[in-house]
Image: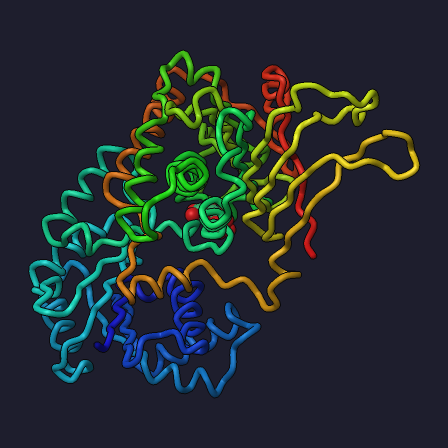
Amino acid sequence: MASTFVIFGASGDLTSRKLIPSLYELFRKKKLPEKTCIVGFSRTEFSHDAWRDALAETTAKFASETFDRDIWQEFAKLIYYHPGDISNAEDFRNLSTFLEEIESGKQAARVYYLSTAPRFYEQAVQALGASGLAREQGAPRRLVVEKPFGTDLETAKRLNEVLHQVFEERQVYRIDHYLGKETVQNLLVLRFANAIFEPIWNRTYIDHVQITVAEEVKVGRRGDYYDTSGILRDMFQNHLLQLVMITAMEAPLRFEADAVRNEKVKVLDAIRPLSREQIAHQTLRGQYEGYRDEPGVDANSQTSTFAVVRLCVDNWRWQGVPFYLRSGKAMSCRTTQIVIQFREPPHMMFRQPTCGTPGANRLVIQVQPAEGIQLHFQTKVPDEGMQLRWTDLDFSYHREFSGTVPQAYERLLHDTLSGDASLFARADEVELSWGIIDPILRTWREIDVPKLLVYPPGEWGPSESTTWMHQQQREWFDACPVLH
Ligand code: BG6
């Protein structure tokens, strides 16, 4: 069956930076379904050709390594533009006629991608319903919703309700681009396609888990958005909790949307709710120096650009194993890593354990940018008696697989076109994750604990975060990845 990919909010940044370059890549790799059309819808007036030309320029920039004029010319034939306003019912009726025209009246699977400002989501969904565009009649209709999905539990629930008035849950694809990352999917493979990790992936062998998403960049031109969002909404509710779920979940029976998501949801369900008292001690928040001078940011802003949250997963596998989640802007370097810190050997018979470093193994999953996995383990230094030293088994994507690691959006867009929702968040998943984040946001706002700490850009957040970890006899794995 043919496919039509409709982008609402087509003149926005996401379309030119991610969506079109990813669709172009799929076309170049011959992974786009046959007879695919791509239609942009937004208020700006463009002719088909003017839009194609504008996209040629931006794609040449954002897919610079693989951009090829001849391939682009072929790809551009699939692209159309239809001007319209989300608040105008007539424009949706016209869009419907236009889609039927380019599909030559034949059945086509359609993907409607909401890439507008989030405040237009409800209106767009209602208009899709009212104009009959959501009706399936033998051909699938799928809706893709970009983040942020609500700003708290209440708004997320409301948005789910509106979506479900028009679409069934199986038709809804809530994007979290972290799930499109190769290394995140590889964590599923590491855990569930190898038998050696499962026996040690639990409280008996693991002391704690650290998940860090550090960014070197500051908020830049996104001050307006960021100042009303902050690090918990921007990174924790979605990306960090997704990483927790993939790390902690039980093995699904099959790699199928509901089997995978059922297991993920159980992890969120098992996360122990934090009382105000616990939030005061088990979370940290910070703001980088100079944040208040960024364009669009309030001069007295209390918004956090850094946070740490310690969570416990109350089930048999993870009882007593803390999950430390940490993320920040303006940090030392860009790195996303999941550290599985194992317990120390019960008895050390060698008299010279390595000085200073904790005597326990560590598995580091480098999600980006130095995609790979390292297992740190003790070895004997040759010719030095029984002196030991830490060394690594080191797997690097770039060494092992030539070529670049594909963009997360490539995989996700492919899955929306082929109807595989395994790597998308389900309604209950987003609601449960807001249920974890909301009380923290509320406590920070209402009783102002813990205090907002100020940190200098270019470090690992406030120094208090290091002290806090030491008080728990643990240490952050503060290492910038080595790019091969
Ligand atoms: C986005 C956030 O969802 O993820 C941004 O809104 C953040 O603030 C980005 O920079 C990080 O994504 P990645 O893929 O670069 O880690």
- Return the x and y of residue 285 as percentages of the image width and height: 50, 26
Residue 382 or residue 331, whichever sits in front = 382
200, above or below 58, in the image = above
- Classify residue 135 as left or right of residue 44: left
Q: Is residue 111 visible?
A: yes
Residue in the image at 47% along x and 19% along y: 320
Q: Residue at x 13, y 60 (%)?
A: 128
Taking depth in this image into account, of 229 and 357 the one nearest to the observer is 357
Q: Is residue 356 above or below residue 10?
A: above
Quadrant hosting residue 408:
bottom left
Q: In the image, what residue occupies the spot 28% across and 41% down? A: 262
Which residue is at 56% across, 42% downward?
A: 337
Q: Position of residue 43 (x, y in %)?
A: 25, 66
User: In this rendering, would 35 be left or right of 53?
Assistant: left
Image location (x, y in percent) of residue 39: 27, 73
Can residue 228 be seen in this snapshot? Answer: no
Q: Is residue 57 above or below residue 292?
A: below
Q: Which sits in the foreground, 190 or 452? A: 190
- Quadrant that contains the C terminus: bottom right
Query: Taking 35 as reference, is 399 left or right?
Result: right
Q: Quadrant of the N terminus?
A: bottom left
Foreground pick, 54 / 246? 246
